[in-house]
Amino acid sequence: MQTLPASWYHDPEIYERERVALFGREWLMVGRARQLQSPGDYLAADLRGWNVLVIAGHDGEVRAFHNVCRHRAGPLVDRGTGRCHTLVCRYHGWSYELDGHLKRARDFGDAELPVDELGLLPVSVAVWRGLVFVNLDADATPLLDALGSFAAECEPFAMEQLQFSHQVAHEVAANMEGYHIPLVHPRLNKEVDARRYRVVVGDRACVHTAPARDGSVTSGKWLWRFPNLALNISPDGMNVERFVPLGPRRTRIVYDYFFRDLSPAAQAANEEVVRLSLEVLDEDRAICEAVQRNLESGVYDRGWLSPRHENGVAYLQSLVREAVGG
């Protein structure tokens, strides 16, 4: 199978088609359920041009809305997390109940308003294994059905028992696959047996496995779910990875680290896991940014994917072709 054309990695028109087809129609992780434990707890995210907020209601329900006031499109909350008793527009002060209903049109005057028709615009939301997902498509398949075999692969792991440690975010132009492990990641190559690295694809997901060498801190599974989520799960923790495009040429990679034990006794081992993952990320960033420059040079158009080592890349690219067209 041939790769996608080089232009697909930097063409603004292709990027816009991807933005609409992927971020406008797929289930996307935006946060953690523990960020929404009390009424009024919220998290707000930018889904590549669509601003969304997720909030816990007084009735215990988690709801999601477009972060857009129905008056003049002002934002209700800043990106990130917080807590409020009422959602108040930062532009003109219209206020909304936690369930999205319009509460008060501040200083609007005597005109009659169809209050029941001016609630916040809802967004589909679901919680799976402690992770919060949203989907802008009103006709979206239920999350668990959409996750399919990806959810089944995660079933043996007690994800809910893990404790959130911290988040790290980096910007990089990156494509992630395993063919390059021996050359690009010398330390990771010592941790896992790259010769036995395998990728199983299907059901819009990839499952990566490579047996750990004796004494390694790296073991478990690396699971990827279209379009931008990966879980690196081990017996002692989990790294949730999100790949968020910032434009045709840049991507933000967000890592959420979870561990079974956050006590001082486990600190050194946990720090070693984080250190290795960030070392791998730095190595990926260096080679992938060099590849990105070559893709933009006009010298290279497309290549051929190894059926033995690059079936995961081929599967991802086939899903992108299907979603975007071309």
Image: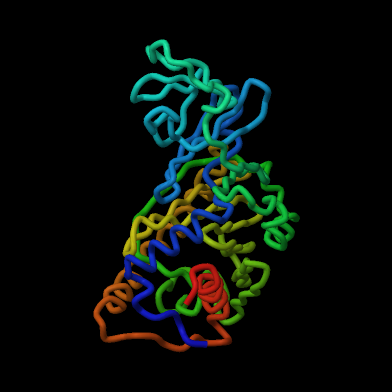
Q: Position of residue 95 (x, y in %)?
A: 46, 19
Q: Is residue 283 visible?
A: no
Q: Name, please, the residue furthest toward the front.
A: 111
Residue situated in front as seen by the camera: 65 or 263:
65
Q: Residue at x 60, y 40 (%)?
A: 163
- Indicate left or right for 70 with 232 as reference: left
Q: Residue at x 41, y 51 (%)?
A: 48
Residue situated in front as seen by the camera: 203 or 129:
203
Q: Residue at x 45, y 30 (%)?
A: 70
Q: Name, please, the residue furthest toward the left.
A: 297
- Indicate left or right for 113 with 296 as reference: right
Q: How are the residues colored?
A: rainbow
Residue situated in front as seen by the camera: 129 or 90:
90
Q: Is residue 44 visible?
A: yes
Q: Quadrant of residue 76?
A: top left
- Indicate left or right for 197 with 172 as reference: right
Q: Quadrant of residue 198?
A: bottom right
Q: Is residue 287 above or below residue 92?
A: below
Q: Is residue 83 above or below residue 211?
A: above
Q: Position of residue 155 (x, y in %)?
A: 74, 55
Q: Is residue 24 above or below residue 74?
A: below
Q: Position of residue 141 (x, y in %)?
A: 68, 54
Q: Position of residue 213 (x, y in %)?
A: 59, 71
